[in-house]
Image (cartoon, rainbow, N blue to C red):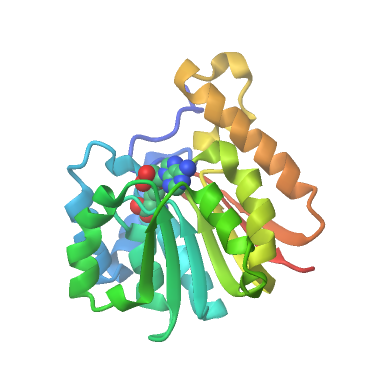
Amino acid sequence: MENTRMPVSTKNPTVLQSQELHEYILKTSVYPREPNALKELRIATANHPMAFMGTAPDAGQLMTFLLKLVNPKKAIEIGVFTGYSLLLTALTIPDDGKITAIDINRKTYEIGLPVIKKAGVEHKIDFVESQALPFLNKLLEDPEKEGSFDFAFVDADKNNYWNYHQRLMKLIKVGGILMYDNTLWGGTVAWPEEDVPEAKRKWRLCAIEFNKLVSADTNVEISQVPLGDGITICRRIC
Ligand code: SAM
Ligand code: CA
């Protein structure tokens, strides 16, 4: 019998259970509207052995949409890789907007940097080479940073999502948006553990735990979007 549970084999993970449908969405609604700079960055990343880590273009399109609604002056991103989500944020926020972009690896950021420079948006980016958790703790030592960000995108070590959430909830203003990527972990969050490949079990449990905690957080409104690898969108309400 055909295994309908396996995620489809596109470059980026997706929880959509039909390759045809995913390709249809990409071809019809996403690729034709993807800015050239993002396309260029995606192509520059394509041969990287970890290219699958780049934000899925369909998820990126939703992120752009939300950014346009929020029009953030200050954004924060955890997990940059070669910069797909960072570049789309930089392209979307106002010219005097700033993104604090945190990653432990500057080398991968530098793969995308020429495209970011060519797009003329490098001045909006403060790249920080650091573990995210101590950096967030440092930001919180300054009371002026509390409630000073409008938008956060989290796409790094999944075992720290709840730790990030607790800190970001202090840094993001009431009404601000927090987006968490990969919260459905290839759909495995809904599988019986014995069906999940060994390599996916640890991060699946992290996603399950985070989803439970964030769902119970009455300080946010949430929407779990089954796009890309699953995105949880939160709006801080108090
Ligand atoms: N958003 C990126 C994009 O659109 O291409 C993809 C990010 S990739 C999935 C995850 C990134 O998180 C990697 O570049 C990795 O170096 C970084 N990372 C992993 N653990 C981290 C940590 N503890 N603190 C900061 N960055 C971390
Ligand atoms: Ca991701």
As drawn, is 81 to the left or to the right of 97?
A: left
Number of numbered discs present?
Answer: 0
| Residue 106 at least partly seen | yes
Q: Is residue 196 above or below residue 38?
A: above
Residue toward you, 51 or 151: 151
**Vertical arrangement, residue 151 with respect to residue 19, above or below:** below
116 or 221: nearer the viewer = 116
In depth, the one of 229 and 211 nearer the eye is: 211
Residue closer to the observer: 26 or 198: 198
Report x, y in % for residue 207: 60, 37
Q: Where on the picture, by quarter, is residue 91?
A: bottom left
Is 80 left, or right, of 148 in this rendering?
left
Q: Quadrant of the C terminus?
A: bottom right
Residue for point 65% across, 34% down: 208
Residue 50 percent coordinates (x, y): 29, 38
User: Does residue 22 appear in this view?
Assistant: no
- Residue drawn 55% across the image and 63% down it: 152
Question: Where residue 57 sits: x, y (%)?
Answer: 36, 57
Q: Farthest residue toward the top?
A: 194
User: Residue 178 falls in which quadrant of the image?
Assistant: bottom right
- The residue located at (75%, 48%) in the rendering is 215
Q: Is residue 122 above or below residue 54?
A: below
Give the left or right position of residue 170, taking residue 25 as reference: right
- From the top left corner, tell me how far across and down residue 141 is, in percent: 63, 62
